[in-house]
Amino acid sequence: MARRPPPRYSDRRSNPSPPPSPKSNINYGTIALFGGIFVLGIGVGIGVSSNASFDPKNVASREVIDKSAPNAELCVQYGASAIVADMRIFLTLNPFSVFVTQPQMQPGCVLRRSNMNLLEQKRLITSEQARDCRNRMNTFGFVGSLDSQPTIDCIYPNDAAGNLFLNPPGSVSPRSEGENF
């Protein structure tokens, strides 16, 4: 018996249905489910990593400092609220050593030079103190309410180091007029 070669062309009549198309295992419902899980995961991640706290022990914003300042309305209008760190430094020469006390943090206020006369009007400083402080191009800062014996000091701005948060390396933005005291 001789072998017959296979036919060159298949008979279309013997296979009436077309070949099955490849089916996708992922349908629209599964895609929507995974998308929802992704969005929910991002939301939970943001909620967990957020460190916003309105606890008075956590000073995380300028608004908290402004509200804590003595005479807050006057301070914001005529100066700037501040965090005042009171500490003492002890320096010995023989042997040479430096000792620092634990800083005491408290809210305070720095007045603009143009508003130093407010303290003089309230009779909290003398005209001589105001003149001496103004002649040295300084201003006044205070801790405590102006109505009940505040601690007032003639303070000077120290711009030697600059503020690296305002002018990062490579930036050329000038200081705004509101930053001058």
Image: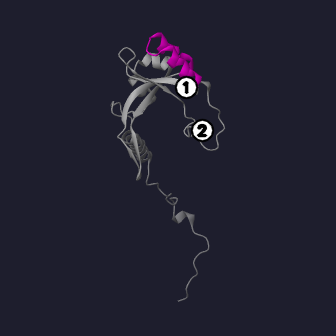
What residue would you read off at disc 1? 138
Few, some or many residues within 10 Å of mark 2 (<14, 14–19, 20+)? few
Of the 4 image quadrants, the one containing the C terminus is: top right
Name the dominant secondary structure of the magenta segment: helix
Number of dots carrying numbers: 2
- In this view, the residue in front, 119 or 179, is 119
Q: Residue at x 43, y 15 (%)?
A: 124
Residue 28 percent location from the top left of the image: 44, 45
**Which amino acid is tagged 1?**
Asn
User: Tag 2: residue type?
Assistant: Asn
Membership of 153 in magenta stretch: no
Residue 75, compared with residue 160, is above or below; it is above
The magenta region covers 113-136
Please tell me which residue lies in front, 58 or 29. 58
Task: List x then y, in percent, for residue 62.
Answer: 45, 29
User: Would residue 129 be counted in the magenta stretch?
Assistant: yes
Rendered location of residue 92, percent (x, y): 40, 47
Q: Is residue 121 above or below residue 112?
A: above
Residue tagged 2:
167
In this view of the protein, which residue sits in the foreground, 12 or 84? 84
